[in-house]
Image (spheres, rainbow, N blue to C red):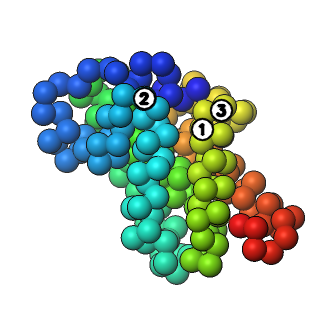
Amino acid sequence: MTASEHPGAGKQPLPAGFLKNPVHLLAFGFGSGAARVAPGTWGSLAAIPVWLLFFWLPPWAYWVVVTFAFVVGIWLCGRTADDLGVHDHGGIVWDEFVGMWIALGLLQPAFGLTGVIFAFVLFRLFDVVKPWPISWFDRHMPGGLGIMFDDVVAGFMALGVYYLATLWLPAGWL
């Protein structure tokens, strides 16, 4: 279970005006992480419309954007966690944004909604269940890097399963 999926995670109180700070607003996924129920899932869903802004880039540029978002996310998430005094507040969902963008990394416009839904389900499954090595990173990496890294690994695991599914499933299923 991710910190953002723990019961009551979205109910952790935020200081008044907290999301007016652009750093916190980004770390909270443009406010999607402030959802009272399943903020990690809402953050993952909110990542999809943002992904639509850059998924059309050539692959090398796409991965530059994702890498940049990861590096910036280390700082965003670490700073927001420090400001809240909580290691990984349930509302911090920038890590879900980056993990989703990794999971969606093979999709092309022709794949359509089915591929997006499949990538979403795979990412949420890996992020919530946290099989090894995700669980190890979640427990042992501190700070902003720790907040980000387990979701990056979940994203790559989802991407790998997605890729294998495209090889095994009949054309047009994804």
**Residue 124 at x, y = what percent?**
60, 42
Identity of the residue drawn at 14% across and 42% down? 20
Would you say the residues marked 1 and 2 are in contact, meaning their CB atoms lie under 8 Å apart? no
Residue 168 falls in image quadrant: bottom right
Query: Which image quadrant for residue 134?
Result: top right
Residue 46, given in percent of the width and then of the height, sits at 41, 51
- Mark 1 and mark 2 lie on one chain; the one further toward the N terminus is 2
- Amino acid found under the numbered disc labelled 2: Val
In x, y percent, where is residue 129?
Answer: 66, 31
**Three-letter code for the amino acid on which mark 1 is drawn:** Asp
Q: Determine which of the numbered discs, if any, sits on residue 37 in the image.
A: 2
Considering the numbered disc 2 on the image, is that residue within a helix, a strand or a loop? loop
Q: Residue tagged by mark 3?
A: 130
Tag 1 near tag 3, CB within 8 Å: yes
Q: Nearer the viewer, residue 13 or 155?
A: 13
User: Please, is residue 3 above or below residue 173 in the view?
Assistant: above
Say which quadrant the N terminus sits in. top right
Name the disc covering residue 127, or none: 1
Name the element at disc 1: helix
- Depth check, front residue: 80 or 28: 28
- Residue located 63% across and 47% down the image: 121
Q: Name the kind of residue labelled 3 in the image.
A: Lys
Dot 3: within a 10 Å radius of its alpha carbon, few (fewer than 14), some, or many (20 or more) residues? many
Q: Which callout, 3 or 2, points at the residue further toward the start of the chain?
A: 2
Give SS at disc 3.
loop
* Cα distance in 3D space between marks 1 and 2: 16 Å
Note whether residue 2 is visible: yes
Q: Which of these two is toward me, 80 or 122? A: 122
Q: Is residue 71 visible?
A: no
Mark 1 or 2: in front is 2
Q: Quadrant of the C terminus?
A: bottom right
Instruction: Tell me if residue 115 comes above or below residue 25 in the rendering.
Output: below
